Amino acid sequence: MGKPVNVEVKLGGKIRTTEQMIKKFKRKCKESGILEEYREKTLYHKTKSQKRRDKKAAAIRRARAKQNKKQQKLPRRK
């Protein structure tokens, strides 16, 4: 588990509205790396074989879409 990080933003000074406060909070979270750490921990990691199957299926879908697009562009003979 990562180090505990506390991010605090207070209203006052340059921060005059809640929108500015939220923007500042988001920036501080991004700088401290809280969001990236959360995403890494909650991400489901697929096996190599599953990734390979997904990649192959995506390539087949792209090829079929490309083929369909070519067929639509061809003029029809009467």
Image (cartoon, rainbow, N blue to C red):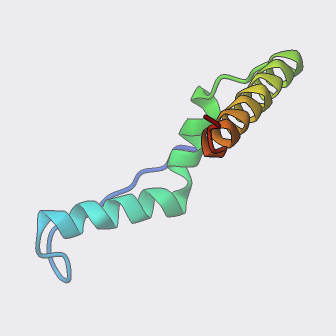
- Left or right: residue 23 versus residue 15 is right
- Of residue 70 and residue 75, the one placed in the foreground of this image is 75
Residue 65 placed where, x, y %?
Answer: 66, 34
Q: Residue at x 17, y 82 (%)?
A: 13
Q: Answer left or right for 58 relative to 29.
A: right
Number of disc labels: 0
Q: Quadrant of the C terminus?
A: top right
In the figure, residue 25 lies in which quadrant? bottom left
Front-lying residue, 39 or 57: 57
Question: Which residue sits furthest front?
Answer: 78
- Residue in view at x 22 percent, y 65 percent: 21
Q: Is residue 33 above or below residue 62?
A: below
At a point 60% along the width and 39% down the height, the residue shown is 72
- Report whether 8 appears left or right of 31: left
Q: Quadrant of residue 60?
A: top right
Task: Examine the rendering and report whether any part of residue 74 can be seen.
Answer: yes
Q: Position of residue 35 (x, y in %)?
A: 51, 46
Quadrant that contains the N terminus = top right
Image coordinates of residue 43 in percent, x first then y, are 62, 28
Q: Residue visible at 14% across and 63% down? A: 18
Q: Can you tell which quarter of the image residue 41 is in?
A: top right
* 71 over 60 or under it: above or below: below
Relative image position of residue 42 (x, y in whole percent): 58, 27
